[in-house]
Image (cartoon, grey):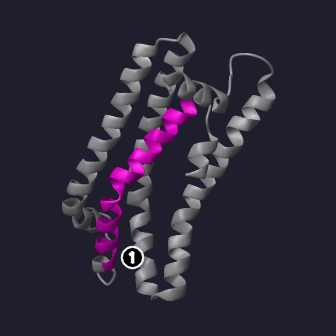
């Protein structure tokens, strides 16, 4: 059973170490680029939908939260890319014990960080928005939206770290599909 799973995993992985690099790089980069574009479009869609079906005040509230959300996401995407590099290094060296340890550590970091942000974010949402000088007429909506966003942080971080783990074996298609 374990051998079958390993074979399936290897069939989806891109061997970046052997053969021509151009086609492999293209297969690796296209889903990765498409995933990044879709993640950026997520906030744009939020603003567009709210702008179409809600008030301009609600749209402004979301706009006020974008810098905080982007800061947090980019910090943790950077950390997940670091985990990606370490895992890929161990894969290249074929050190299976270190691969397992690093994957488990990455998942634990994602879960602990996500749960921490879920809880801590409920308390810091309003003070951060005050610090950013969010206009008072959108403060309540901006605080609510940011608190709701913090509720999803464990899932967002788990996705980003899981995608980084899959990318370390050369699989960019599954993170893109998810």
Is residue 140 left or right of 9 when viewed as pictured? left
Q: Position of residue 165 (x, y in %)?
A: 49, 33
Residue located 43% across and 78% down the image:
60
For the point 37% across and 32% down, the residue is: 106
**Residue holding disc 1:** 61
Q: Estimate the x, y position of residue 8 in percent, counting from the top left.
A: 61, 30
Judge from the rendering whether residue 76 lies leftward or rightward of residue 163; answer left or right.
Answer: left
Q: Could you say where residue 15 lies in the image, as x and y percent from the top left?
A: 68, 22
Q: Could you say where residue 12 lies in the image, as x and y percent from the top left?
A: 65, 33
Q: Within the image, what quadrant is residue 144 found in?
A: bottom left
Q: Look at the numbered disc 1 and give the secondary structure of its residue.
A: helix
Magenta stretch?
141-169
* Left or right: 139, with 167 as reference point: left
Main secondary structure of the magenta stretch: helix
Between 110 and 132, the one lying in front of the other is 110
Of residues 154 and 53, which is closer to you in this image? Answer: 154
Q: Residue furthest front?
A: 1
Vertical arrangement, residue 71 with respect to residue 87, above or below: below
- Residue 74 vertical position relative to residue 56 in the rendered view, above or below: above
Q: Nearer the viewer, residue 17 or 11?
A: 11
User: Which class describes the residues within 10 Å of circle 1: few (<14), some (14-19), or many (20+)?
Assistant: many
| Visible residue check, residue 21 | yes
What residue appears at the point 80 percent right and 28 percent down from the top-left corner? 22
User: Residue at point 47% right, 11% down?
Assistant: 95
Q: Is residue 40 above or below residue 99?
A: below
Residue 163 inside the magenta-drawn segment: yes
In magenta segment, residue 60: no
């Amino acid at each position: 059973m374990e051998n079958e799973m390993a074979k399936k995993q290897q069939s989806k992985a891109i061997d970046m170490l052997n053969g021509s690099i151009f086609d492999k790089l293209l297969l690796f980069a296209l889903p990765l680029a498409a995933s990044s574009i879709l993640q950026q479009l997520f906030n744009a869609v939020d603003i567009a939908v709210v702008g179409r079906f809600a008030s301009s005040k609600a749209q402004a509230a979301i706009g006020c939260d974008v810098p905080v959300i982007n800061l947090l996401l980019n910090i943790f995407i950077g950390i997940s890319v670091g985990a990606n590099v370490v895992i890929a290094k161990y894969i290249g060296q074929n050190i299976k014990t270190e691969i397992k340890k690093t994957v488990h550590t990455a998942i634990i970091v994602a879960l602990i960080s996500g749960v921490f942000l879920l809880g801590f974010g409920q308390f810091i949402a309003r003070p951060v928005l005050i610090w950013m000088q969010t206009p008072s007429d959108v403060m309540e909506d901006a605080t609510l939206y940011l608190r709701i966003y913090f509720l999803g942080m464990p899932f967002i971080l788990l996705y980003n770290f899981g995608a980084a783990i899959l990318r370390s074996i050369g699989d960019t298609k599954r993170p893109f599909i998810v």
